[in-house]
Amino acid sequence: MHWPPRQGVRPKISGNVARFAIAFVLLLLPVQGAAQETRPAGHALMADFDGFTDRAQALEARAKAMMDDAAAHPFTANGEQEGYADFLANVEAFAAASAALSVKIDTLGGPRDLRCIYRGMAADARMRAGLLTAAKTAGAAAPVFKDLRALFADAQDVTPKDMAMFADQHDGP
């Protein structure tokens, strides 16, 4: 056999080499399949939902504390409450997480109702963060804290707790 092969002449592969190559490829196939993600796509989504619910629960408690403090000291300049800047940053993070979940639900072909709810929560959180920033006094901010508390409570209620609840969401009547 000449190397490189002459034009138009195919090199012969012995039967043993061919069998070895086929066996090698067949042995690799199950390994490649095992290396791939075997969990359903919904598993990662449920982890995101769990984290989102935990965030909403913590923010609901913090919004209540901020609301109570603002109501107790209504003439204090808004923004002077302890943890105000962190709370505002967490509201923005909540809005970003809501928007990201909406996109993820959309990407997975999830229910339109649910993805719209998450988009709406993101918009509502951003709007309320703007209102909170615009409030001059703690007393003016108190109703915004109350509304945010309600938003975070609603977020916990609408977030699916398992894939069955996610599948049970629907696109209308």
Image: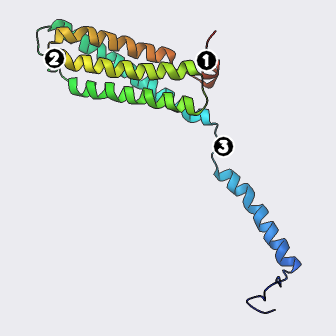
The total of numbered circles placed on residues is 3
Badge 3 element: loop
Where is the N terminus found, in terms of image quarters? bottom right
Task: Name the residue at 37% across, 26% down.
Answer: 94
Residue 54: percent from the left, percent from the top? 43, 24
Residue 84 is labelled as none
Asked if residue 3 lies left or right of residue 15, the reply is: left
* Gap in angstroms between the C-alphas marked 1 and 2: 40 Å
Precedes in sequence: disc 1 or disc 3: 3
Which residue is under mark 3? 38
Task: Name the residue at 61% across, 36% down.
Answer: 41
Which residue is under mark 1? 169
Which residue is under mark 2? 78
Residue 22: percent from the left, percent from the top? 81, 67
Amino acid type, callout 3: Thr
Badge 1 element: loop
Where is the C terminus found, in terms of image quarters? top right
Circles 1 and 2: CB atoms closer than 8 Å: no
> Closer to us: mark 1 or mark 3?
1
* Gap in angstroms between the C-alphas marked 2 and 3: 50 Å
